[in-house]
Amino acid sequence: MSWRSRGLAGLSNLWLYVLCGAVFAFLTLPIIAIVPLSLNAGSFLSFPLAGVSTRWYEALLSSPQWLDSFRNSLLIALPTTLLATPLGALAALGLMRIQSRLHVLALAALTAPLGVPVIITATGEYFLYAPSGLANSLTGLVLAHTTLAIPYVIVVVRASLEGFDVSLLRAGASLGARPRVVYLRILTPLILPGVIAGAIFAFITSFDETVAALFLAGPEQRTLPLQMFDGVREQVSPIILAAATLLVILSCALLGTVEILRRRVRKLLA
């Protein structure tokens, strides 16, 4: 490659980095902007800040309504994760064993909530749960969130199974191990990081879900996203930005964990 060609390639890469940086800034700046606003000492959302204060974080942590909504979100997200993770992982394992044309149909059916608008799913769940008394109940919300979270677990676990060598299972079976032992001692350790990543996505999906809560939550099941939605609709207060900042920090921490697990899966399957 000549000097001129190398120069043009370097200039092209520079413009590519600049373009990627501009897109990244365009996507993240609206999210980053809420952080200084949550520290505003004034009572209105305005730049420049009236001062720097943690008064809105203190109000958030001392408000019974916000604390109850956070508790409700945890009470719904944790059981949802415990239900969606094994169901999604088993579904991904079942899809791995299907070699016929039914594989595409089964995958489309199991991941349908990813392509269907959430409001349609929530409407159907409401009409399904209302006659049985599951609407306006914690159990109904857990089941609804599990339906929305399972596809994420399937996609993540299925991705971790892409590079899995099925001959390892046959080798374990040929040595006399029972199927349960083969799956627990050989398959599970190799895909465990993917399963944990799927559980994290299931937790985020449930904790951040708003539409299903609008249809199925009662006065005693107000979640944190629903509390934020009502706060924006009734009165915009910087306390909402304090809650949003904490959610952003939590999401970044969980996504960072997912990235670490993804790299670990790649090393195990390499």
Image (tube, grey):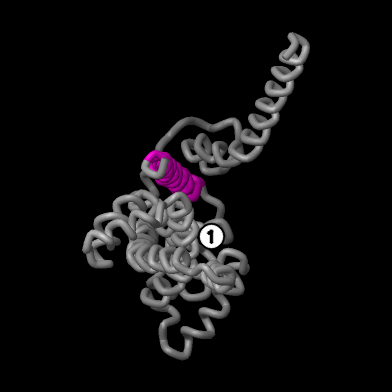
Is residue 213 something one can see in this rendering? no
The residue at the point 60 percent across, 36 percent down is 29
The residue at the point 47 percent across, 90 percent down is 131
Which part of the image, by quadrant, shows the N terminus?
top right
Q: Residue 185 location in percent, x, y? A: 24, 56
The residue segment tinted magenta is 238-267
Is residue 241 something one can see in this rendering? yes
Q: Residue 21 location in percent, x, y? A: 64, 29
Please tell me how many numbered marks the rendered image carries. 1
The answer to whether residue 159 is above or below residue 31 is: below
Q: Residue 190 location in percent, x, y? A: 33, 50
* Furthest residue in direction bottom, as rendered: 131
The answer to whether residue 50 is above or below residue 137 is: above
The residue at the point 56 percent across, 43 percent down is 44
Q: Which residue is mark 1?
A: 229
Position of 209 with respect to 89 (left or right) is: right
Q: Residue 252 location in percent, x, y? A: 45, 42
* Furthest residue in direction front, as rendered: 174
Which part of the image, by quadrant, shows the C terminus?
top left
Q: Is 262 inside the magenta-drawn segment?
A: yes
Q: Is 208 inside the magenta-drawn segment?
A: no
Identify which residue, 28 or 160, lies in the foreground. Answer: 160
Q: Quadrant of residue 178?
A: bottom left
Q: Quadrant of residue 174?
A: bottom left
Identify which residue, 178 or 110, lies in the foreground. Answer: 178
- Amino acid on which the number 1 mark rests in the picture: Phe
The residue at the point 34 percent across, 54 percent down is 168
Which secondary structure dominates the residues rendered in magenta? Answer: helix
SS label for mark 1: helix
Identify which residue, 103 or 237, lies in the foreground. Answer: 103
Q: How dense is the environment of label 1, judged by Cα within 10 Å: few (below 14), some, or many (20 and up)?
A: some
* Furthest residue in direction top, as rendered: 3
